[in-house]
């Protein structure tokens, strides 16, 4: 009786070890997804809540000129996203080598510490430096994309990544609203401490609730099923990867291209100076609000009809929705169009991540998703620069035409890559 049981036990261990990473973590993926959604929400809240009072904090740190306050505020805000764009591929590669959970813990703990340190900055240089470090060592949402993208079952990956995207978008939307109230209660420095404390809660949940079955000896070296498949993947998937990276960059480039001039544009629609900042904030938030409504639904649609169909369709629809924004006469018309644009943009990231997961060997999935995150944040940095230059040289309306054209061209590139 003991001999058969021993034999079964001996066979079971190798069988489990021979399973792929996704198969071994099937039982954990839903619980991990919920923690990642909460962590992405809290970290994005903490990063974006300083928008309403960032100029006040810069002034409090000794910057006196109004022009210098505006300049340093922009540098401080963009530093975090620049840092994330630089290090996302590195953290993705380390996730492939050492596991996804350690990267989540690193991001949460690092951001909790840095967010608290920002509250005791002595000058604007320390503020910018700490914001840059927050991007370099942080990136909880990026690490979550790697974990969810590699653990969720193939048939539900789009929905899971869409839900994760919803959490991040909700954080980016709610953050400025919270940032408008907390400084009045806790003070500006106290608000940063509160943000660090909330991220610390996410770190504790990540440490004690998230589960991962990672085998470095096999998961960091797993290749394609056969040599022929590996050769075919290497020969044909560069076009796919290029299209996915370009599309990931366009997601935030399209949304951010109008940001530098949106307040001026809204002012030209008859909004009075006393309401201009508030109305401009509402218009900016509409795209994120629209994306929250449809991200999970479009992710599920990608599971049903295929990621390429969703990507190409969303790019074309978003490109077309850019055009009427140049002809609005009321601010609410612009807000409605931005909300519709956000609804169509929301389908891109889940579908991109779903396709990227299968465009490379399993051992390189984290690195690939890291490159996607880098491309996405690069769009956030490049978008305002391109939009500002176009507005200066060709007029504000031209920003909508150029951005819409780029989206349609990107859709053609994606169609070509799918054919490859």
Image (cartoon, rainbow, N blue to C red):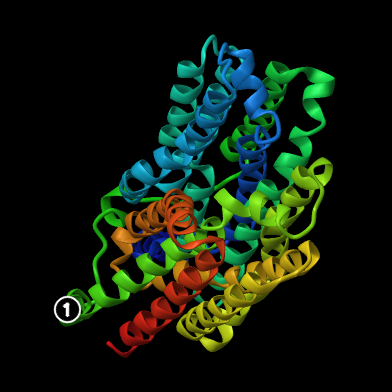
Relative horizontal placement of residue 221, taking residue 305 as reference (left or right) = left
Q: Quadrant of residue 132?
A: top left
Does residue 54 appear in this view? yes
Most foreground residue, 335 or 13: 335
Residue 255 versus residue 71: which sits nearer the camera? 71
Residue 2: percent from left, percent from top: 44, 59
Rendered location of residue 376, percent (x, y):
44, 56
- Asked if residue 107 is positioned above or below residue 16 in the image, the reply reads above
Q: Which residue is mark 1?
A: 235
Q: Is residue 336 above or below residue 34?
A: below
Residue 81 spot, x, y in % from top left? 47, 42
- At 45% from the left and 80% from the top, the residue drawn is 408
Nearest the eye: 13 or 228: 228
Tally of numbered tags: 1
Q: Quadrant of residue 69?
A: top right
Residue 210 in percent (x, y) is at 58, 45
- Neighbour tally class for label 1: few under 14, some 14-19, many 20 plus, Cα within 10 Å: few
Quadrant containing the C terminus is bottom left
Residue at image point 35% right, 80% down? 413
Q: Looking at the picture, does residue 323 appear above or below residue 98?
A: below
Q: In this rendering, does residue 1 appear at all?
A: no
The residue drawn where x is 18% and y is 74% is: 234
From the viewer's perspective, is 77 left or right of 359?
right
* Dot 1: element: helix
């Amino acid at each position: 009786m003991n001999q058969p049981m021993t034999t079964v036990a001996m066979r079971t261990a190798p069988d489990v070890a021979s399973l792929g990473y996704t198969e071994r973590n099937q039982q954990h993926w839903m619980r991990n997804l919920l923690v990642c959604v909460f962590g992405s929400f809290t970290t994005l809240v903490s990063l974006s809540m300083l928008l309403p009072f960032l100029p006040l904090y810069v002034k409090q740190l000794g910057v006196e000129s109004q022009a210098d306050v505006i300049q340093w505020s922009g540098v401080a805000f963009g530093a975090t996203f620049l840092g994330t764009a630089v290090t996302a591929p590195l953290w993705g590669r380390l996730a492939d080598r050492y596991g996804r959970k350690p990267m989540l813990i690193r991001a949460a703990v690092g951001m909790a510490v840095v967010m608290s340190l920002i509250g005791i900055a002595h000058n604007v240089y320390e503020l910018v430096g700490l914001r840059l470090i927050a991007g370099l060592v942080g990136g909880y949402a990026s690490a979550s994309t790697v974990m969810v993208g590699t653990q969720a079952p193939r048939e539900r990956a789009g929905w899971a990544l869409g839900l994760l995207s919803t959490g991040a978008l909700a954080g980016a939307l709610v953050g400025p609203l919270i940032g408008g109230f907390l400084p009045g209660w806790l003070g500006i420095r106290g608000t940063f401490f509160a943000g660090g404390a909330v991220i610390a809660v996410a770190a504790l949940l990540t440490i004690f609730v998230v589960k991962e079955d990672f085998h470095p000896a096999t998961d960091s070296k797993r290749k394609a099923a056969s040599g022929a498949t590996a050769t075919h993947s290497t020969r044909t998937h560069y076009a796919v990867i290029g299209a996915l990276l370009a599309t990931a960059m366009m997601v935030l480039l399209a949304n951010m291209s109008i940001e530098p001039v949106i307040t001026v544009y809204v002012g030209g629609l008859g909004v009075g100076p006393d309401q201009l900042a508030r109305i401009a904030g509402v218009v900016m938030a509409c795209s994120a609000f629209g994306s929250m409504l449809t991200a999970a639904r479009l992710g599920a649609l990608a599971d049903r009809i295929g990621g390429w169909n969703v990507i190409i369709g969303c790019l074309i629809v978003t490109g077309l929705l850019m055009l009427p924004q140049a002809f609005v006469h009321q601010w609410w018309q612009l807000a409605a169009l931005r909300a519709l644009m956000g609804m169509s943009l929301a389908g891109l990231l889940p579908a991109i991540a779903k396709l990227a997961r299968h465009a490379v060997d399993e051992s390189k999935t984290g690195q690939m998703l890291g490159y996607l995150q880098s491309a996405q944040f690069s769009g956030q940095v490049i978008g305002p620069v391109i939009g500002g230059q176009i507005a200066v040289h060709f007029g504000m309306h031209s920003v909508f035409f150029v951005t819409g054209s780029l989206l349609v061209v990107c859709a053609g590139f994606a169609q070509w890559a799918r054919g490859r």
